Amino acid sequence: MTGIVYKSTGSWYTVKTELGHVYECRIKGKFRIKGIKSTNPIAVGDIVDFELESGNDMISGIINHIHDRKNYIVRRSVNLSKQTHIIAANLDQVFLMITINNPPTLTSFIDRFLVTAEAYSIKAILLFNKMDTYDEETLLEVKYLAHLYRNIGYECIAVSAKTGKNIEQVKALMKGKVSMFSGHSGVGKSTLVNAIEPSLDLKTKEISSLHMQGQHTTTFAEMFDISFGAKIIDTPGIKGFGVVDMDNEEVGDYFPEIFRLKQDCKFNNCLHIQEPQCAVKKALDHDQLAYSRYRSYLQILEGEDDTYRTDNWEKA
Ligand code: GDP
Ligand code: ZN
């Protein structure tokens, strides 16, 4: 039988078949996927094959095969520095929720997020939330940012989780897909998900109790079916979007507009810093590349973005 992993709590995996039957499954033998040093071999969103076995008057499954992943997101294991924990696999899209103030979402945070999404090959959509609260000046800022990111190729939607503004548009995008919602604490993720599906009470709330902080808190992602034929992956306590290690020469490839410009740089290994005849610097000088994007690019290149490291988002 084949199904999707909806939940994993250590050694047991909740797997749902296409017919909607749910089985608790375990793994047989060692599962090592080449190229990934991860503490968990199977993650939420994985498509697995399993066989049923019955014992002790309960039927459970034995997973014997994982289908190839379209993508997956990881985070570093807290204690084992070299190892990673796969948070979820096979995501279709991730919505980044942004508020201009209360709390502020900085462009450096947005860009770091988008770079990570590009590196993971996951489509990112920007949701500007709390539109019902903005004064004219702040509205201009939303317009400016939406224009900036739309020009690069990212879909941007201005929403209000509170009033329901453009929520139908978000639902339409979610239909038939696996989505995840990210963004700073307080931007309105839980409110939006509740507006989308009131019966779902997601634990998107951060782990707030003090005694949990700094400890090895294992948070488990979970997939939920939404009534209109969509799936959400909830990652309680995980604010960020995993970590990706990349070479300096790769960074520009994850800024789509820089990637496009790069073709016209004199040197094909141009890092767009001081090199002569650099198409990226030229575009910057002619206002064809947003300065905030270039600044984010440099920050990631120079590793100066520690405050925006996804490891820290989890604590933010
Ligand atoms: P989360 O931490 O991202 O899950 O954020 P919450 O959903 O808990 O929202 C944080 C606060 O913002 C709550 O007090 C919500 O009522 C409020 N909020 C969320 N969305 C909106 C919105 O669109 N408009 C307004 N005015 N408040 C909102
Ligand atoms: Zn260049």
Image: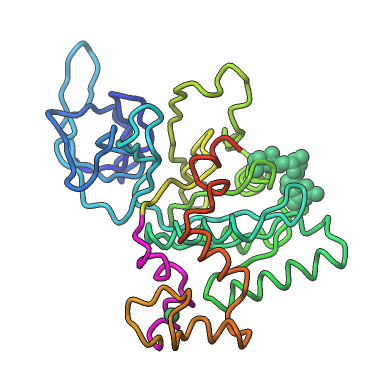
- Identify the image quadrant of the C terminus: top right
Taking 13 as reference, is 141 above or below it?
below
Q: Residue at (20%, 44%) from the top-left corner? A: 66
- Residue lying at the far left in this picture: please name it: 29
Give the x, y percent position of residue 186.
Answer: 69, 42
Closest to the observer: 115 or 132?
A: 115
Give the x, y percent position of residue 253.
Answer: 39, 70
Give the x, y percent position of residue 190.
Answer: 64, 41
Q: Residue at (49%, 81%) from the top-left corner? A: 280
For the image shown, how many numbered marks are present on the structure? 0
**Taking 157 as reference, is 133 left or right?**
right
Closest to the observer: 209 or 9?
A: 209
**Taking 81 as reference, is 181 left or right?**
right
Q: Residue at (48%, 74%) from the top-left corner? A: 273
Give the x, y percent position of residue 314.
Answer: 54, 37
Q: Confirm whether the magenta stretch covers residue 186.
A: no
**Taking 163 as reference, is 117 left or right?**
left
Closest to the observer: 200 or 77?
A: 77
Taking 83 as reference, is 92 above or below it?
below
- Identify the image quadrant of the N terminus: top left
Q: State the extent of the magenta-drawn residues as a range.
A: 246-264
The colour scheme is: rainbow
